[in-house]
Image: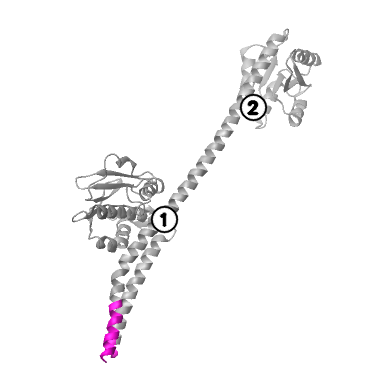
Amino acid sequence: MKTLYKTNILVVDDNEDNLDLIDDMLDDEGYKNIICVLSAKKAYEELEKNSIDLIILDIMMPEINGIEACQYIKSDERYKDIPIIIVTAKSDLKTLQEGFDAGANDYIKKPITTEIELVSRVKNSLNLKLYMDKYKELNQNLDQRVKKEIEKNREKEQLLMYQSKMASMGEMMENIAHQWRQPLTNLGLTVEKIKILYMFGELDKDHIEDITGMSLKLIHQMSSTISDFTGFFQPNKSKEIFNIKTTINETVTLVNASLDSYAIELEIKDEAEEIILNGYKGEFSQVILNLLSNAKDVLAEKKIKKPKIEIDISSDEDFIFIKVQDNGGGVPPKIINKVFQPYFTTKSRNKGTGIGLYMSKMIIEKSMNSTIWVENISAGACFTIKLKKG
């Protein structure tokens, strides 16, 4: 029993005898869905109405010949993947080349005398289409999977950004506490002074003005601290012109009190000229803050005697180099290649999230199109940022 094929084959020839011959040969082989038409114009109409799997197209036809019809069909995005077998009485290289240049996949020479050649070429062309359809489907599935993975990675990155910001906010709250501790103590002493002066009957106009002036000065100092930290957290994802040195100094101001509380000395070595960049100032500031906070935590945890952090700024013709180094003993060699991985941390659970250095790397590499790396030096770890000028 012959296999019945469900494929739709469109046969185009201006000679009815040729159409009948091809139809009979294919029918004998089990191809039952054969559509026969006498012109290229009729072929276009059938393509609009039916899902065609293969076209057998005669070259020599009036009005629109087979070469022109082939070019037209292959130029249409809807039909360009349909295999076309051209039928020709000419077998010279020029004619065949014209057919293949027009988009034909195969050819059959007239007159068609046996079923074997016709059926063999039809099967080959249909198998080719089957493979191409599968390949196309695989590509579409792959595209969908890639898009899903990209979306998942985007969501993951957004989550990491959020977690990094929350971790930074925790650091900032600690820094605010350090910044406010002394002014609050002084403000408390000022209030106590009012009470003592009142008890001894010495609270006169001069004392009130002196105490009021001192209190307002302390309040202004605390308010300035809030303004500094608010500026750090303001979302600004647009590029701006900023001064590298000024931004580093502003960032250092945010953590000075926290470093002082651990008796950590901070030294800035500046060998570079004034450097202006067009980039993301807030994100760059966050990287510097992450590196300083990381160094502070290491020095505090290891209880280093005479703890120190150095920021070294230098440049050459093409690059700016910013080094943040400490004397905390360095990163163990077995984990130094992991420090920029997300969620990797050597700190206790309540001290580290493992995303600060990862986000720093993402900011430097993606937002600033530059590089960052870590290495051990004689006294401790050194993080180097290499920024492109311009």
Q: Residue at x 29, y 81 (%)?
A: 192
Q: Nearer the viewer, residue 340 or 316?
A: 340
**Residue kind at label 2, given as amino acid type:** Asp
Estimate the x, y position of residue 162 in percent, counting from the top left: 45, 53
> Relative to 64, is 240 above or below?
below
Q: Nearer the viewer, residue 247 or 259?
A: 259
User: Which residue is the site of mark 2?
Assistant: 81
> Relative to 142, is 284 above or below?
below
Would residue 346 be seen by someone viewing this image from the given angle? yes
Q: Secondary structure at mark 2?
A: loop
Question: Quick one: label 1 or label 2, which is nearer the N terminus?
Answer: 2
Q: Which mark is residue 314?
A: none
- Name the quadrant containing residue 134: top right
Would residue 240 be seen by someone viewing this image from the given angle? no
Q: Which is closer to the viewer, label 1 or label 2?
A: 1
Estimate the x, y position of residue 166 in percent, counting from the top left: 42, 56
**Residue kind at label 1, given as amino acid type:** Lys
> Relative to 313, is 375 above or below?
above
* Residue 122 is inside the magenta segment: no
Q: Which mark is residue 165?
A: 1
Q: Which residues are magenta?
A: 188-207
> Relative to 6, is 289 above or below?
below
What quarter of the picture does the N terminus occupy?
top right
